[in-house]
Image: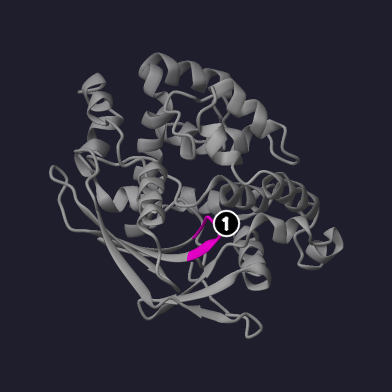
Amino acid sequence: MTINLNFNPMNDIKELYYKIQKEIIPTSPFHFDSTVYKPGHFPTSDTKWESGKRWQTMLWRGETLGLILENVGNIEKPKILLYIYSDKLLQNEFLDSVVQEIEYRYNLKLDIEDFYNNFPHDSFLTPVIQKFRGLRPMNPGGLYEYLIIAIVLQNTVVRRSVSMMQTLFEKYGTILQFDNKEFYCFWEPHVLAQTAESELRDLKVGYRAKSLNKVSEAFADDSQKELELRNKSQEEQKNALLSLYGIGPASVGYIMFDVFHHLDLLTHISPWEQKIYTKLFFHKDYHKEVIPVEKMIKFFNKQYGKYKALAVNYVWEDIWWKRKKENIPWLEELIRL
């Protein structure tokens, strides 16, 4: 789906004149494209990808930044050039913190070889690993941004989620210009925290208006919330996430994997995923039979143990990359983009 940026003339465009280059060496092996771009994620106007390169915006410590990640290495000897664009000169300590955050968000220091060594001849994983050796899960934004996206994804078709996200960007986002391109950048949490629920409802987000308010309030009151949670146990992280208004087990499952990088945690499968897994792992027609979630989790746990979430993700990513090259009717039926 192509996104119309529809830049709101009421939004000033912030030009980012300053450019700094940093070098990142991910752990080997590393597959750049399948790590930095996820075809299964719905499109948003704060990022762009082409093979070997990703553009995105970043709100970090109050600064609005433009980033480019460029692949200049290979799978066995990986290297990324990170270009950081800003509207003013930035201190070295700040720049170093951006690099460290990108390393964390993109899982660039993950020991992926141990995963491969555990499943050398798995019928599901082997063909995917051959294509995407070095693929790893990631979340390009912060936890707050992920939660906003999770809220707009709730109980609707993907097309409407895309529309709601774009409307929020147009109303509350900042337009950044760098590398001769323009992208939206996220707002600070206090912006939606201070916005009347009625105003959000006017943007056609429905009942999600209250969730957007409440989640924004939680992060406006605690700017270090995500960094503190990273150092907590799995149970503490789950409880903290579930305490957020409007955030349920499905969203928490995604966050624990994508944001906090728990590769073993798979306790919830949504009805939509359940149909896809029925087809991919059990070779059943989901119109006639949908494999029970309990049976799926038992199978994944027995087959992949401490890497069950990562193993399932590999097969998941593979089908979405296939969709980029060919029409898959049964998948299109489920997506409804």
Considering every residue shown, the one lying at the far bottom of the view is: 9
Residue drawn at the location 71% of the way across and 46% of the way down: 221
In the displayed structure image, the side of residue 323 where residue 208 appears, left or right = right
In the displayed structure image, the side of residue 237 where residue 84 appears, left or right = left
Q: Is residue 227 visible?
A: yes
Name the quadrant containing residue 264: top left
Name the quadrant containing residue 71: bottom left
Q: Amino acid at mark 1?
A: Arg
Segment colored magenta: 59-64
Count up the numbered dots: 1
Percent of width and height locating residue 213? 77, 52
Percent of width and height locating residue 40? 45, 50
Helix, strand, or loop for circle 1?
loop
Percent of width and height locating residue 137? 39, 40
Residue 60 magenta-highlighted: yes
Eyeballing the image, is 244 above or below 43?
A: above
Colour scheme employed for the rendering of this structure: one colour
Circle 1 packing at 10 Å, graded few (<14), some (14-19), many (20+), is few
Residue drawn at the location 65% of the way across and 61% of the way down: 160
In the displayed structure image, the side of residue 78 where residue 34 appears, left or right = right
Residue labelled with disc 1: 336
Q: Toward the viewer: 218 or 140?
A: 218
Percent of width and height locating residue 29? 19, 39
Eyeballing the image, is 162 above or below 6?
A: above
Q: Is residue 274 visible?
A: no
Eyeballing the image, is 109 above or below 156?
A: above
State the quadrant of the C terminus: bottom right
Q: Toward the viewer: 290 or 261?
A: 261
Residue 101 magenta-highlighted: no
Q: Main secondary structure of the magenta part?
A: strand
